[in-house]
Amino acid sequence: MPPQSFVPQAPIQAGPIKIGKFKASRIILKESWALLSHDKEILWFPVLSAITFFLSLALLVAVGYFGILGGNLDNLKGLEDAGQGIKNIAIYGTLLGYYLLLFFITNFFQSGIFIIVHARFTGENLGLRDGLRGAMVHVGKIFVWSLISATVGVILQLISDKSKQVGKIVATLLGSAWNVLTYFSLPALVIGQAGVVDSFKESAMMIRKTWGETIIVNFGVGFIFGLVFLLLVIIGGVILQFVPDVFYGAIAVGSSLLFILILISILSSSLNAIFKLVFFEYARTGTVPQGFSPEVIQQAIKAR
């Protein structure tokens, strides 16, 4: 059976479309939602990413506790008596390991989303296992890129720690610039088949073409989901005013809000990966992916 295709609901107009970036962002977000509704297996990738991360982190903590500390936290006192150089190596080495674990697992499962979404752009219908197998093909490059990102994270933390005020400001500015310039690095690695170094160059080049729309859509998604969650918090607070047992009511409301927050995080992460790849494909090939309105993308992102 041939794969089904989703058709975004876009208005039909005569002549060229002139549309603002914020309105274009809402349309792109709506069309990303349509793709997500069609390929619901995408939602499993953020879930698997979170589960894998916490299980891996728990395993590493257990190895450190029993293997290095011998099951006794008092052995940490030996580190306190060591020189400052040894302390710094232990602290920043642990931080590097944490960042590497976080970035590698996040990048790996996000790569799976890219593979499924890119296949949908070309009319193919891939599943969860196809995405995971595709990510495994690029696992070496994903690891190297994650190691670079983790190293940058540690360097930024070092800068922040050197000067409590100025260092934090500098680290924040450098971190923001790094995140923007490398926004398309992972799609370039996985979909564009670029090397690690070339993926950085390609991302920096593409971000010039999609700068405004990338920032606006990311802000818009976060704002919308944040507003929804804030509204639910207010509703939960109002409900508590009418609950006889405040303690159990607070547990029920808190549990519900936690569940909703997790759901929002899953949806936000999935949508972010989808429209990131939309921008990447258009900036790279000049072709609007299947399922998205050409007039909206072309007006929103002015390639230079």
Image (cartoon, helix red, strand yellow):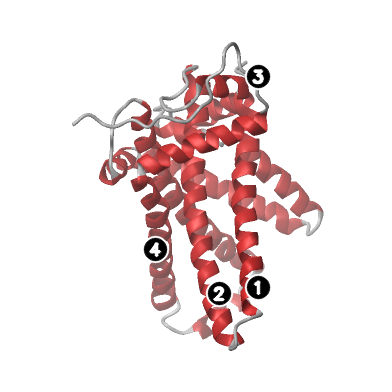
Task: Describe the element under mark 2 as helix, strand or loop.
Answer: helix
C-alpha distance separating marks 3 and 4: 49 Å
- Residue 237: which numbered mark, if any? 1
Q: Amino acid at mark 4?
A: Ser
Mark 3 or mark 4: which comes first in sequence? 3
Q: Residues within 10 Å of mark 3 (few under 14, many from 20)?
A: few
Identify the residue position indicated by label 2 in the image: 253
Mark 1 or mark 4: which comes first in sequence? 4
Task: Describe the element under mark 3 as helix, strand or loop.
Answer: loop
Mark 2 or mark 1: which comes first in sequence? 1
86 up-or-down from 81: above or below: above
C-alpha distance separating marks 1 and 4: 36 Å
72 up-or-down from 197: above or below: below
Residue reaching furthest to the left: 1
C-alpha distance separating marks 3 and 2: 45 Å
Between label 4 and label 2, give the one nearer the viewer. 2
Q: Residues within 10 Å of mark 1 (few under 14, many from 20)?
A: some
Comparing 146 with 290, the one in front is: 290
Which image quadrant is residue 23 in?
Answer: top right
Task: Describe the element under mark 1 as helix, strand or loop.
Answer: helix
Between label 1 and label 4, give the one nearer the viewer. 1
Q: Amino acid at mark 2?
A: Val
Comparing 25 with 167, the one in front is: 25
273 up-or-down from 50: above or below: above
Identify the residue position indicated by label 3 in the image: 18
In the rendered image, residue 16, in percent from the top left (x then y), is placed at 60, 13
Left or right of residue 85, residue 269 in this image: left
